[in-house]
Each structure stands twice: as structure tokens, then as C-alpha cells.
């Protein structure tokens, strides 16, 4: 029934407005497929008018989803200080107090998860990966100079400073090859897709440009701890330093990225217009809320599967 509604939405931009469960697997898969299709470099199409109508409809669904997510964090974000230095302190505090921080999933991945557990986790994460480099590229359009320069430095690091071997995206794909996983939208949980869809939606819409700056900044802030735990798990199951390079690298490099992002992008942006503090805070909390939902769903899947295996053994 719901699937049929989705098909209608894909085909007929005039479909009646229905209230969606914005966090369901079905809704997020719909958005993920659309994102994949629309961001692909393409040729002019004879059916461009139909495609445009469909895009308009999908974009309104995307905004409905972003607004549903924003409404969940707006109260907390409104409490973020507008004074620039106080704001940075608040933002940095999210490493301790942000949604999903300190989730028990990560010590478990580091110390106990089996190779199959790590493969499933990685498959979910990789399919939901929106591509940090492209998100930065979309976000930097028309930003004030100082912030734009910081995003450019960050982007250059993502590009391996001009060296293919150092590019972060392909480094992540190499782990997929080593673990022999084939990430795909249709086998990925909605929570992981929601995270990527939220990041893509914020980065590609100028109305959420400040949100995107906050969401990307909070990834830099919180990624090192998670990366270190995943790297530890991958080392434990036998991956070499070269094979797990993506996670080892981000456990260290993102500490520097985060400091620079906060100092060179967030601080001057809020100094210039204090209203941006709230938007940046909302974007950061939207990203962390999506992350927290992922961790909970992953634990449910992995720990329930583990409990079932133990029962079968006993
Ligand atoms: Fe990176
Ligand atoms: Fe980074």
C-alpha cells in the first residue's frame, strides 16, 4: 500500500499530499534513489519537463523530511549562545553532550564484534555515505571568503591534496572490497539512508546552507572517536594498516579538521551574523540525531542477531 503511494509519487508530481512516515525505510529509500539519480552527471533529456515535475515533487518531500527533523532539535538549538566565542564552546561541548555521543555500539565494535558484524555495520555505513567531499563542494557556494577558504582546505584534504591514493572516498571503497561487501540502497536500513539524505538535502539547498556548515562541522568534531573504535575492531579481525587506512586516518586528521572548521568557518560566520548560530546548531543537532538513530538500529540488529545465535548454540 505504502509502496504504491511511493510509486505514484515517483510518477505523478500531482499526486495528492499524504502524510509520510519520514523516518521509515520506504520513505528514505525513495529519497536515496532520487538523490542518486539526480546528482549523477547526465546529458540533456527529451523528457526534461517530466523529470523537472518529478524533481519538484521529490524536493518538497525532502523539505518536509528536513523540517520534521528540524522540529525535533529546534528547542535545543534555540538555547545555543549567539555570542561567537560562547557559541564555539557550546558547539565543542556537543562532543560530550550531543545525541548519540558515547553510544555503547562503538566499544562493542572495537572489542567484541565478529568479522560478519563489522561487515554488516560497514555495509550500512557505506551505502549511507553521502560523500563528504561532494557535500563540502555543494556547501561552499557563495560562502563568505574566510569560511570558503576553510572548506577549500578541507576539500583539498578529501582529494588527497591532488594525489589519487590519498583521496578519502576511494579509500573507503577499498575497505568494501577487502570486506567483500556490496553496499546497496535496498539492503540499507532507513536510519542510515536518512543520515545521508539529510546531509545531501542540507548541502544542496541554499536555504539550509548554514545548517550544512554545522552538520559537516559536527562530523569533524565527533568522527575521530568513532573512527578509532572502528579501526580497532578492523585491526582485531585482521585488517592491515593499509586496509583500514580510512578509519586510522580520520581518527587523527579530523581532530585537526574540527579545530580549523570551528576557528576559520564557524567563528567568523557567527561574528558576521549571529542568526547563523541557531541554524548551525540546528544542522549539527540534525546530523547527530540521525547518527543516534543509526546506532540504535544497528545495535538492535546486531545484538538481537547475536542473542539469537547464542540461543541456537545453547
Ligand atoms: Fe575525510
Ligand atoms: Fe575531515
Image (cartoon, rainbow, N blue to C red):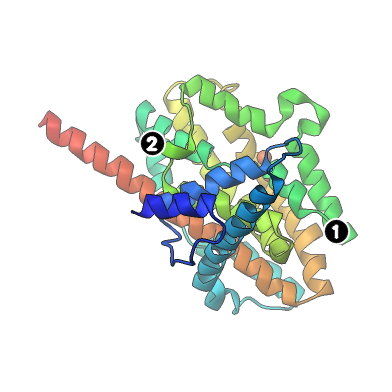
In the structure shown, which secondary structural element does the residue marked by tag 2 occupy?
helix
* Circle on res. 53: none
Q: Where is residue 11 in the image (x, y as percent from the top left)?
A: 53, 50
Q: Residue at x 56, y 51 (%)?
A: 197
Q: Does residue 213 appear to the left or right of 306 in the view shown?
A: right
Question: How far separated are the C-alphas under marks 1 and 2?
Answer: 44 Å
Q: How crowded is mark 1: few (under 14 residues within 10 Å), some or many (20 or more)?
A: few
Pick out the residue farthest to the left.
314
Q: Does residue 299 appear to the left or right of 79 in the view shown?
A: left
Q: Which residue is drawn at 49% across and 67% down?
A: 17
Q: Which residue is drawn at 77% across and 71% down?
A: 270
Q: Does residue 302 appear to the left or right of 42 in the view shown?
A: left
Residue 269's quadrant in the figure?
bottom right
Q: Closer to the camera: disc 1 or disc 2?
A: 1
Q: Quadrant of the C terminus?
A: top left
Residue 101 is at least partly visible in this image: no
Residue 162 is at least partly visible in this image: yes
Give the mark nearer the N terminus: 1 vs 2: 2
Q: Position of residue 18 (x, y in %)?
A: 44, 66
Q: Which of 5 and 148 is in front in this view?
A: 5
* Circle on res. 111: 2
Q: Where is residue 32 in the image (x, y as percent from the top left)?
A: 54, 46
Q: Position of residue 272 (x, y in %)?
A: 84, 73
Q: Does residue 32 appear to the left or right of 271 in the view shown?
A: left
When the figure is inspected, residue 190 is found, relative to residue 250, above or below; the finding is below
Q: Mark 1 points at which residue?
A: 142
Q: Which of 169 and 4 is in front in this view?
A: 4
In the structure shown, which secondary structural element does the residue marked by tag 1 occupy?
loop
Q: Residues within 10 Å of mark 2 (few under 14, many from 20)?
A: some
Is the CB of mark 2 within 8 Å of ligand 1? no
Amino acid at each position: 500500500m505504502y509502496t504504491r503511494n511511493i510509486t505514484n509519487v515517483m510518477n505523478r508530481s500531482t499526486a495528492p499530499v499524504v502524510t509520510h512516515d519520514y523516518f521509515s525505510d520506504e520513505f528514505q529509500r525513495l529519497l536515496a534513489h532520487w538523490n542518486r539519480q539526480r546528482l549523477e552527471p547526465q546529458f540533456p533529456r527529451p523528457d526534461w519537463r517530466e523529470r523537472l515535475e518529478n524533481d519538484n515533487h521529490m524536493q518538497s518531500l525532502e523539505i518536509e523530511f528536513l523540517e520534521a527533523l528540524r522540529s525535533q532539535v529546534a528547542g535545543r538549538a534555540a538555547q545555543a549562545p549567539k555570542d561567537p566565542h560562547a557559541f564555539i564552546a557550546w558547539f565543542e561541548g556537543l562532543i560530550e553532550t550531543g545525541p548519540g555521543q558515547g553510544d555503547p555500539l562503538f566499544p562493542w565494535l572495537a572489542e567484541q564484534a565478529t568479522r560478519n558484524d563489522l561487515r554488516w555495520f560497514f555495509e550500512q555505513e557505506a551505502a549511507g555515505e553521502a560523500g563528504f567531499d561532494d557535500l563540502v563542494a555543494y556547501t561552499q557556494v557563495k560562502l563568505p571568503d574566510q569560511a570558503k577558504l576553510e572548506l577549500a582546505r578541507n576539500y583539498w584534504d578529501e582529494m588527497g591534496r591532488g594525489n589519487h591514493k590519498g583521496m578519502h572516498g576511494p579509500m573507503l571503497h577499498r575497505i568494501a572490497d577487502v570486506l567483500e561487501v556490496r553496499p546497496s540502497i535496498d539492503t540499507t536500513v532507513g536510519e542510515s539512508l536518512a543520515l545521508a539524505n539529510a546531509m545531501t538535502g542540507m548541502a544542496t539547498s541554499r536555504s539550509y546552507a548554514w545548517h550544512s556548515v554545522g552538520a559537516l562541522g559536527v562530523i569533524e568534531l565527533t568522527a575521530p572517536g568513532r573512527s578509532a573504535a572502528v579501526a580497532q575492531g578492523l585491526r582485531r579481525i585482521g585488517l592491515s594498516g593499509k586496509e583500514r587506512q580510512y578509519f586510522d586516518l580520520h581518527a587523527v586528521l579530523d581532530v585537526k579538521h574540527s579545530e580549523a572548521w570551528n576557528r576559520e568557518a564557524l567563528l567568523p560566520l557567527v561574528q558576521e551574523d549571529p542568526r547563523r548560530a541557531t541554524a548551525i546548531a540546528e544542522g549539527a543537532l540534525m546530523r547527530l540525531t540521525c547518527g543516534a538513530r543509526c546506532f540504535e538500529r544497528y545495535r538492535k540488529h546486531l545484538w538481537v542477531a547475536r542473542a539469537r545465535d547464542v540461543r541456537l548454540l545453547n
